[in-house]
Amino acid sequence: MVSQKDLKILVFLFEKAQERKGTTIEELAKSFGISSRTVRNNLERIDYYLKINHLPPLKRERKNGMILDLEPEELESARKLLLEMNTENYVFSKEERILYLKLLLFDAEGYLTYEQLSQALFVSRKTVIDDVHFVKEDCEARGIKLIGTKHGLKYEGEELKLRRLLTDSLLEIFTPLELWEILRDIYPNKSIIIEKMWHKTAGRNGIGICEEKLRAAEQKGKSSITDAQYYMIIILTVLAGKRRAKGKPSVTEVDGGKPPWYLEEYFKEMHKEKTYDFRKEDEDYLLTELHRIFNLENLGKSESLSLAITEHILLEVSERMKKPYYKDAELRSSLQKHLISLIENSFVSYDTDMKNLRIMTEENPVLYQSIQNCLRQFPDEKLHTDPKSEGALLMLHFLAADERRYMKNSINYTTIIVCNNGVGTAKIVSARIKQFFPQIQIITTTGLRSAGKVISEEKPDFIISTVSFEYLNIPVILVNTLPTEDDFKKIRLFLSGNGRMNKSFVKDTVYSQVIKAITETCEIRDAEQLEEKLSRIFFIDKPKLELLDALTEREIQLGLETKGWEDAIRQSARPLAEQGFVTPGYIECMVQNVKTMGPYIVITKGIALPHALSTDGVLRSAISLATLKTGVSFGHKMNDPVQLIICIATSDKKEHMREMVKLIQFISNKEMVRRVNEAVTPGEVLSVIQKMHGKG
């Protein structure tokens, strides 16, 4: 009999054996967070499991530790044995037993007796009765009856409620990626017996068609959805198809409202596929479940709200830590991506070591508390299931930014980090790699699903991955979620044998040298055209005029008298519409954003930065600035009343992020803000801004 922990250790030993490496009891104890004594008990059961399956026991060497001494073909056979494992030789945890009971009852055609359940789990009748009690409590809370008669046990309830019981129970243990992987025959992940049962329950009929149609929908929309939503759309579609094939009643009386663009396209594509019986009831089911699981109502505001929260966090942390984090565009982008995921998802699965995170928070108390203070300012947004853990994960972005600054002058290699979901675990790996290898530039982190596209665009020297992954002509180094000394040895071996040390050069420096050499030795007919052509060759971005620099007296209003925050936004933004920079509708969208999302545009004490999406009516990028005669309340507990309003209109998201860096730098300077608020003429405001830019 082997347990879930035994199997995890066995899989770990398989991975080591593929590299022809051993491990020690101490390493296993540290990796799995258990005592050495417990590890020895696990290894005894593993040896017995290997023996009864006619495989050699673990080989123990004083120098190399323990190793599965198997040839590649034997390793493959051993892996297949794991997939063939059944309840007879597996020890369930209580959590697994309860979930397995739910799966059995969900998939059953009729009644299941206590004897049948006892035999299925290989536990006593009393244990099953105790576990059924927990299942019954969960059912009653969801409006489902667990009927017990002389014939046995059976669910009685609406089909939608039964499916929700199943998906919610699975999502308490597995991530959407893991559930999708199981349907694609990529397992074990966490619990082999549960995974086999989930595979049987949902099947995989039509999974390829579903993925093809969803990718087509994404391409048509020229955008992408989050990985978690992608996986859940596939999972729910396949599950609905399997239930229909089993003759189960359809899901009725469900109204999820208007579907987002990608679901509309997906539904159209699925209806075109004649080999897959996709129905209107499936549309309703998918839409209502995605609304429930992912807070789809937040999709429309996730980008704007995440930007607002990002700026709050950057300002707070910059001020508390006395570091200019608000100038770091990469940090701003990574924070926003993290927050978008939190806003759109109603569940969070952490595939990381929280003990390690606690150590990091203790080492960086001021940074951690600063982030926690910011999160507490958004109590209505449900940004986290566990604020302590979420604050720690957000903290990793700042630690990564510190490492980037530390090592930016000593970069010799570029890499991309690949993990299951591209967020939490990748940030931990990233921080560890940067700590020990300052010569490595981490271009970005990415989830498994989008890895191929990102790698083809960025072309790194090598890839670091926490999941099995291959890419043509680019080396992949497989590491643990929390990289060990063995992982560092792999990376050192690659660096020492690669022959590309000291390969880096600064493009801008070479570009400047070429320009200098040409001007010193040649007669130039068209200097502007030469500079433009060379900048293309060297990939040097031509600096764009910043909106603060482009501000003129026509966009500045001082001492405005307003009737409230709505009137304050409309009056301060009026010059943008009058000069043809935005449509009148753009100004109304700025007002509506505050009504929908709250006063988060009040970015710091006394200052508001109203804005909307570029698609809401931006004709040309611009900003306007207005001071108010009397401060106005926007409803922000900490930063009201507002005296200074800067309205922003940018042509795209990248420009918005770039401009925010300069605007935050401006409003962070309290002396300059004071001088602007006290200015009598627009010319005085322009003078303050020019001095900030070193032009005064």
Image (tube, grey):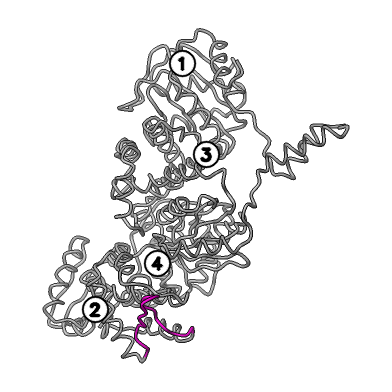
Quadrant occupied by the C terminus: top right
N-terminal of the two: label 4 or label 3?
4
Q: Secondary structure at mark 1?
A: strand
Mark identifier at residue 178: 4
Mark identifier at residue 539: none
- Contact (CB < 8 A) between labels 2 and 1? no
N-terminal of the two: label 2 or label 1?
2
The residue pinned by badge 3 equals 329
Q: Name the kind of residue labelled 1 in the image.
A: Thr
Q: Name the kind of residue labelled 4 in the image.
A: Glu
The region drawn magenta spans: 55-72
- Contact (CB < 8 A) between labels 4 and 3? no
Q: Secondary structure at mark 4?
A: helix
N-terminal of the two: label 3 or label 2?
2
Quadrant occupied by the N terminus: bottom left
The residue pinned by badge 1 equals 627
Magenta region includes residue 264: no
